[in-house]
Image (cartoon, helix red, strand yellow):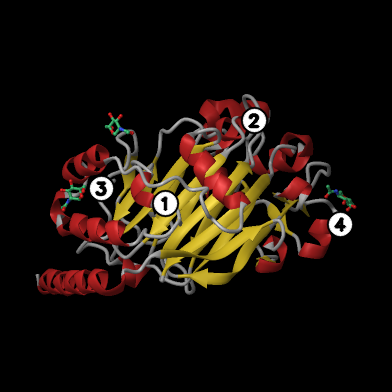
Amino acid sequence: MILSSLGVAGLGLGLANLALGAAVAAPTYQLVDNYDASNFFSSFDFFTARDPTNGFVQYIDQKTATARGLASRPHGAVYLGVDAVNKTTSGRASVRLTSKKAYTRGLFIADIEHMPAGIGPGGSCGLWPAFWSFGPGWPNSGEIDILEGVHGELHNTVTLHTGAGCVVPCTGDAVESTQLLRADCFGHMGCTQKTRVPGSYGAGFNAVGGGVYALEWTDQAIRVWFFPRGSEKANELSSSSASASFGDDIPNAHTNTTTSSSSSSSSFCNSYDDDDDIDNLTRQSRFQNTAPNPSTFGRPIAAFLASPTCSFADHFKEHNLVFDTTFCGDWAGAVWADADGGMCLRAAAGKSCQEYVGQNPRAFMEAYWLIRSIKVYQLM
Ligand SMILES: *[C@@H]1O[C@H](CO)[C@@H](O)[C@H](O)[C@H]1NC(C)=O
Ligand SMILES: *[C@@H]1O[C@H](CO)[C@@H](O)[C@H](O)[C@H]1NC(C)=O
Ligand SMILES: *[C@@H]1O[C@H](CO)[C@@H](O)[C@H](O)[C@H]1NC(C)=O
């Protein structure tokens, strides 16, 4: 009771400040970092400790990864691969990279051409790749799993992990096919939204040349969008990634008010209507430059809304960005027996995830990330 009335008071103050800010000088998203093949390997560190998720993996350092061809820059993109040659009983060699820089809030646009996944039935067995972010003192500064899944999954799963006291019981303005699997964000399980958008993960993602993933993280909401390669938005966002100055590349915003008003009235959590006002205010005032404008993105594939049951300002801060590819472990290993409808167990002739991954290097020839760019925008 006391907490929730405090929350409302705080919100009122926030709105007043925003309105004032908008009248004087509205904050707008500005590009703060642009990672691509030219600077990626100097801006991200190679993580070489034991996999905290207990994967059957050996994360190797930059020198080793470069020498073995597991980290490279083919035709202007960033390649992060795994050892698809050697058998192993101690963990498959792979890489995990962490951005040197940490961010609190922002708009993150990742243009990804290929993610770790095999082709055909059983082709992705054992895999667990992720593009994610997390802050110090896990899970107390939060974790955002932007693009993640296991085995032959076809649809992305978006998950938040936090310290205790963060429950996000709805999918906000996310597309209707998105399903809330768990509402409590605390700890290892996290709060999870399972998407059903075609091509958002795995072989389907790779089949069209990937696409653009966008994360907008504010104190009000954490939203993830996916635009498959060839879609209008992917074209807009990836053409902007090709040029250093945005200039005329980004068409003027065509805000679809039909979409935004219907989603705000029907799909947002009933319990926190004021959230819409903040979003509207900020969205209208923050995009006066040529930075990508999330209000033109349409409905996200996942949406977590802050509320009296979770203060995002308290639970999410100072996130580093991470790309990794691991095998088996706490998620992929735990669901091995059921993976791909039993396909993985059949492909492995009944053997364990670790044995399969260790003894079948050629199964992982497609287990690589190919990243064109990651752009980070923050409000200035
Ligand atoms: C396979 O193992 C050998 C011997 O350790 C190593 O030299 C080679 O680079 C490895 N191949 C890959 C692709 O990691
Ligand atoms: C706006 O959204 C509505 C409802 O989703 C859709 O029917 C309409 O075609 C959209 N208009 C534009 C210009 O995208
Ligand atoms: C948000 O903006 C849309 C489009 O301008 C408008 O239709 C809607 O009523 C606004 N919502 C609120 C809560 O002000």
Disc sitting over residue 39 in the figure: none
Q: Which mark is residue 350?
A: 2
Q: Residues within 10 Å of mark 4 (few under 14, many from 20)?
A: few
Q: Secondary structure at mark 3?
A: loop
The Cα atoms of the two marked residues, 4 and 3, are separated by 47 Å
Amino acid at pointer 3: Cys
Image point (55%, 62%), residue name: 321
Q: Is residue 101 left or right of residue 104?
A: right
Please tell me which of labels 4 and 1 falls first in the chain. 4
Q: Is residue 300 visible?
A: yes
Task: Report the Cα–Cα distance between label 4 and label 2.
Answer: 35 Å
- The secondary element bearing badge 4 is classed as helix
Residue that label 1 marks: 159
Image mark for residue 67: 4
Amino acid tagged 2 = Gly
Residue 283 appears at what percent x and percent y? 30, 57
On screen, residue 103 above or below 347: below
Whether residue 20 sits left or right of residue 146 in the image: it is left
